[in-house]
Image: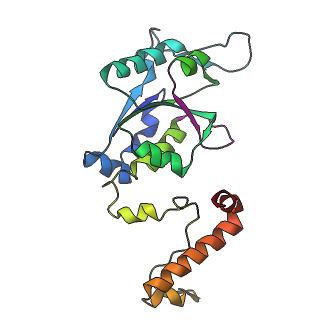
Amino acid sequence: MRIDIVSSLPKSMESILGSGIIRIAQEKGLAEIIIHNLHDYSSDKFGHIDDTPFGGGAGMLIKCEPVFKCIEKLKNERIYDDIIFMSADGEQFTQSTANELSLTNNIIILCGRYKGIDQRIRDGLITREISLGDFVLTGGELPALVLVDAVVRLIPGAMSDAESALEDSYQDGLLEPPYYTKPETFNGMKVPKILLSGNHKKIKEWKLSESLKRTKERRPDLLDELD
C-alpha cells in the first residue's frame, strides 16, 4: 500500500511515521509512505502557498495552484483509489473506514492549514473528506497521522499478532473488555479468577459479557446500531 501525504509542515510528521508499527510496516515493504512539501510546488519565489479569501473575512486559505500541481503530478504517475482531505466537516472516521482503506492500493491525504483550502481544490481533486470528530485543529497533519496509524496497522503482516487487531474495540460493534497481565495481585487488586481458570469457553463468554457491559455504560449508541 502506498500513502502520499501532502502537507505544508512535512517535518511535523516524521517522528510518528518513523516509529512503531508504521515503521515496521514500511521496513517489511507492506506500506510506502511519502510526504510531499506543498511549498515545493509554489511558483512564489518565497514559497508562499496561501492568500486572503475573496469576500473578506479572517484567516488565510491554501491556494489552488500548489495543490493542483502536486496532486496532478502524482495522479500522472499512478492510479489512486482515493484522494482524501482531512476536514472538520467531512464524514466521521470510524473503524469501518479504516478497514475499508486498508484494502486499497494507493491513497493521497491532503492536510489543510490556516483557515482552510480554496473550495475549487475540494471540487476538482478531492474524492473523500474525512473528519476525526466535531472539533477543529490548526491543521490536518495530526488527523492524517491518526488515519495512517489506524489503517497501516490493519495491513496483513504489519502486526506480529494479527488476531489482536480483530479483537479491537469497534471491530465487532462493541468496546473491548478489560485486560490484565502479571502479577495476579497488585496493590490489593486481583485479576478476575475466570481469566486464570484455563477454561477458554468460559473466558470467551466472560469477555463478551464484559464487552457488552462496557459498551452499555460508555457507548449505548453502539448497541442501538447493532439492533
Q: Nearer the viewer, residue 181 or 80?
A: 80
- Give the answer, above or below, for where 97 lies relative to 108: below
Q: Residue at x 42, y 89 (%)?
A: 198
Is 29 positioned to the left or the right of 183 in the image? left
- Give the answer, above or below, for where 99 lies relative to 62: below
In this figure, which colouring scheme has been used for the structure?
rainbow
Is 70 positioned to the left or the right of 119 in the image? left
In the image, residue 99 lies at what x, y percent?
46, 49
- Give the residue at the far left of this rendering: 28
Res. 50 image quadrant: top right
Q: Nearer the viewer, residue 135 or 39?
A: 135
In the image, residue 195 lies at what x, y percent?
48, 85
Q: Is residue 24 visible?
A: yes
- Please provide the residue range marked out in magenta: 125-140
Give the position of the N terminus as an image quadrant: top left
Q: Is residue 47 visible?
A: no
The number of numbered discs placed on residues in the rendered structure image is 0
**26 magenta-colored:** no
Q: Residue at x 44, y 39 (%)?
A: 13
Q: Residue at x 68, y 41 (%)?
A: 135
In the image, residue 17 lies at what x, y percent?
39, 44
**126 magenta-colored:** yes
- By secondary structure, the bulk of the magenta-drawn segment is best described as loop
In the image, residue 18 lies at what x, y percent?
36, 45
- Give the answer, above or below, for where 164 lies relative to 53: below
Give the position of the C terminus as an image quadrant: bottom right
Res. 219 image quadrant: bottom right
Q: Residue at x 36, y 50 (%)?
A: 155
